[in-house]
């Protein structure tokens, strides 16, 4: 064949080209599939504030601990019912003795006494005797000074307290997530400001270079522009690090691994304050969970005084038992029963009861003082959060105006510098003023969002 081509070689070339086409198509398909999967994964990582809160409520260890405390309080309520119910016990006792009185009593219980057992020699020096005693005993409380009723009331108050404490833990968890979520938004917004600033700084650097090359300014202007550009680059680095740290903080608040990454949805936007101070102060006194818990603890301490005084009153219980005595395990050679009513009255116990009552009264006084202190602290927290939220709206308006003015000021100074009507120090001052204005504006909106969340937390409605 011409040019050295043969049918086999030609067929091989076609096959190689076919393989190349197939591989290329497969590569394109794999690339497209990868992009689709990446797109799906990326969209799956979108995280709204509500989702972040839901994750925290499901995963936060502090809430799990609070849930366990509620379960323990439920067990306490169940245990408090035991004071009204009978106690039933069964026991098996083995004994072997040559004690004369015990041998005589054992024979009587087993109903094996005979005439020979009344022989003084046998009575005084009996042979060792083994016995198995099976006893079923029942004790029913009738009256114990009201101890059972007071104990049940205290258990229920303790459970209500744990529920309120759990609710407060939930609210604090939600607040922590909200603050961390807004912190991520703030860090990203700061990063965006830093990116804007580096563009502005780069433009000023180019302007200084052009003026320097034209011989219109000294080298010092160019050096100042380079220093400013380096500082802004450092600001970008710090802002990127702040994004990473705030994201880790959000993961911690949600109870998820801190290495997880999410695309946070939304931006910081101003929120209006739609309530009056008098109303939120009233709501806080009624709805704040930890304040309600403090009130329940105070009521429980009052019950403790009544509980301590029950020792001054008599107690009455009924007991019944059935005994089986035998020479073998679990035998029933002889059976006997007994019913008893036991009345007890503490006439003097060495001032123990009196000291318990005094201690309970002192504890109740302490709880009253702590409750009053908590109410005052709650009121202060509500006022602080309300004033912060209120002032944040004025700050937002002021900083928004500052950004517009600083932006316009920088534009004017740049034009003046370009025309040789001012020095570069004024340009740097205007640039830094714009950076501060943008940063302050973001901080004002962040403080507004956090203050409103803090107000809800202080009121107990979060």
Image (spheres, grey):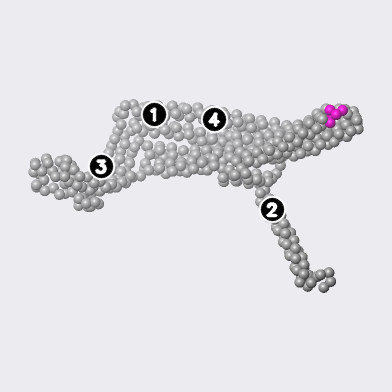
Q: Which residue is mark 3?
A: 340
**392 sits to left or right of 335:** right
Q: Is residue 219 magenta?
A: yes
Of the residues under marks 4 and 3, which one precedes in the sequence?
Answer: 3
The C terminus lies in which quarter of the figure? top right
Query: Residue sitting at 77 percent across and 34 percent down?
Result: 230
**Closer mark to the observer between disc 2 and disc 4:** 2
- Rate crowding at label 2 as few (under 14), some (14 to 19) or many (20 or more) other CA atoms within 10 Å: few
Q: Are marks 2 and 4 in contact (CB under 8 Å)?
A: no
**123 sits to left or right of 348:** left
Residue 394 locus on image (x, y percent): 73, 32
Of the residues under marks 1 and 3, which one precedes in the sequence?
Answer: 3
Disc 1 on helix, strand or loop?
A: helix
Of the residues under marks 4 and 1, which one precedes in the sequence?
Answer: 1
The residues bearing labels 2 and 1 have C-alpha atoms spaced at a distance of 70 Å
| Magenta span dominant secondary structure | helix
Residue 374 numbered tag: 4
The N terminus lies in which quarter of the figure? bottom right
**Closer mark to the observer between disc 4 and disc 3:** 4
**Closer mark to the observer between disc 2 and disc 1:** 2
**416 sits to left or right of 71:** right
């Amino acid at each position: 064949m011409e040019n050295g081509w043969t049918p086999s070689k030609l067929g091989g070339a076609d096959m190689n080209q076919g393989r190349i086409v197939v591989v290329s198509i497969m590569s394109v398909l794999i690339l497209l599939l990868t992009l689709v999967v990446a797109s799906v994964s990326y969209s799956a990582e979108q995280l709204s504030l509500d989702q972040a809160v839901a994750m925290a409520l499901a995963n936060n260890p502090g809430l799990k601990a609070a849930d366990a405390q509620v379960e323990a309080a439920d067990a306490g309520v169940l245990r408090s019912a035991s004071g009204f119910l009978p106690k039933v016990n069964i026991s098996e006792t083995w004994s072997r003795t040559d004690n004369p009185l015990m041998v005589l009593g054992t024979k009587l219980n087993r109903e094996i006494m005979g005439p020979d057992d009344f022989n003084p020699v046998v009575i005084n020096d009996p042979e060792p005797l083994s016995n198995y005693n099976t006893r079923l005993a029942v004790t029913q409380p009738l009256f114990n000074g009201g101890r059972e009723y007071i104990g049940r009331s205290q258990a229920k108050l303790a459970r209500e307290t744990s529920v309120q404490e759990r609710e407060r833990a939930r609210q604090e968890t939600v607040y922590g997530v909200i603050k961390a979520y807004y912190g991520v938004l703030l860090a990203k917004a700061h990063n965006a400001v830093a990116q804007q600033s580096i563009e502005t700084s780069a433009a000023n650097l180019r302007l200084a270079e052009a003026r320097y090359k034209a011989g219109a300014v000294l080298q010092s202007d160019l050096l100042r522009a380079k220093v400013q550009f380096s500082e802004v680059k450092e600001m970008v680095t710090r802002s990127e690090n702040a994004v990473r740290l705030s994201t880790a903080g959000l993961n911690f608040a949600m109870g998820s691994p801190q290495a997880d990454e999410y695309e946070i949805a939304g931006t910081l936007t101003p929120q209006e304050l739609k309530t009056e101070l008098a109303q939120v102060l009233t709501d806080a006194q009624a709805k704040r969970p930890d304040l309600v818990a403090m009130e329940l603890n105070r009521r429980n301490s009052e019950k403790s005084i009544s509980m301590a005084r029950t020792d001054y009153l008599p107690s009455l219980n009924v007991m019944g038992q059935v005994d089986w005595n035998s020479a073998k395990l679990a035998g029933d050679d002889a059976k006997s029963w007994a019913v008893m009513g036991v009345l007890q009255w503490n006439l003097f116990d060495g001032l123990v009861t009196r000291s318990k009552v005094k201690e309970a009264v002192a504890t109740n006084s302490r709880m009253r003082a702590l409750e009053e202190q908590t109410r005052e602290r709650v009121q202060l927290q509500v006022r602080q959060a309300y004033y912060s939220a209120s002032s944040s709206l004025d700050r937002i308006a002021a900083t928004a105006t500052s950004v517009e003015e600083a932006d316009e000021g920088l534009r004017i100074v740049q034009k003046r510098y370009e025309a040789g009507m001012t020095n570069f120090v004024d340009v740097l001052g205007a640039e830094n003023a714009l950076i501060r204005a943008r940063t302050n504006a973001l901080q004002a909106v962040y403080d507004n969002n956090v203050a409103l969340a803090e107000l809800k937390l202080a009121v107990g409605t979060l």
